[in-house]
Image: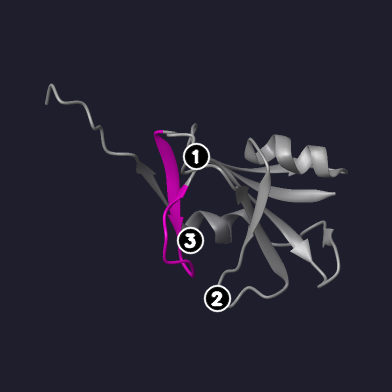
Amino acid sequence: MRAIRINAKDRLIEVVEWETLRDLQRHVGGLIERVELEGLDRYSLLVDEEGLCKELDYGFVIKGYPNPIMGNGLFVGDNCENFVGTDIYDSLIKRMVTWILRPSLDSDQ
């Protein structure tokens, strides 16, 4: 099935394929958590539920969600019972995403 991956490390929005839960986890880089976005009811944004805890230095903010997301994200379709392939355009996602870096906490600065 088709999904749109937000590859925060490489700053890419890319079309990927998935079939299983393991595929979804691989694309986000860990256990998945669903993030609800205002105005996108037919779609789910899946993220690494431990992204903030992993101290990743890359992430993104997305329109419709108030908090930064550290790590990668994955847009899939959502029919209220299951995740399904998505028909959302990657060009739409590109307009919604702003890349961020975690501020350095080094004491040498």
Please, what is the three-letter code of the amino acid marked with disc 3?
Answer: Met
On the image, numbered disc 2 is attached to which residue? 38
Indicate left or right for 49 with 101 as reference. Answer: right
The x, y position of residue 17, in whole percent, is 80, 42
Task: Tell me which amino acid carries mark 2.
Answer: Glu
- The image quadrant that residue 14 belongs to is top right
* Bounds of the magenta segment: 57-69
Instruction: Tell me the SS state at disc 1.
Output: loop
User: Which numbered marker is on residue 41?
Assistant: none
Q: Is residue 97 left or right of residue 36?
A: left
Q: Secondary structure at mark 2?
A: loop
* Dot placed on the residue nearer the N-terminal end, 1 or 2: 1
The residue carrying mark 3 is 96
Q: Earlier in the sequence, mark 3 or mark 1?
A: 1
Q: Residue at x 73, y 72 (%)?
A: 42
Closer to the eye: label 2 or 3 = 2
Q: Is residue 65 magenta?
A: yes
Residue found at x 64% / y 41%: 28
Alpha carbon of mark 1 to alpha carbon of mark 2: how far?
Answer: 21 Å
Badge 3 vs badge 1, beta-carbon distance below 8 Å: no
Residue receiving disc 1: 8
Tell me the crowding category of disc 1: few under 14, some 14 to 19, or many 20 or more residues within 10 angstroms, Cα based.
Answer: many
10 Å neighbourhood of mark 3: few (<14), some, or many (≥20)?
Answer: few
Identify the residue shown where x is 50% and y is 39%: 8
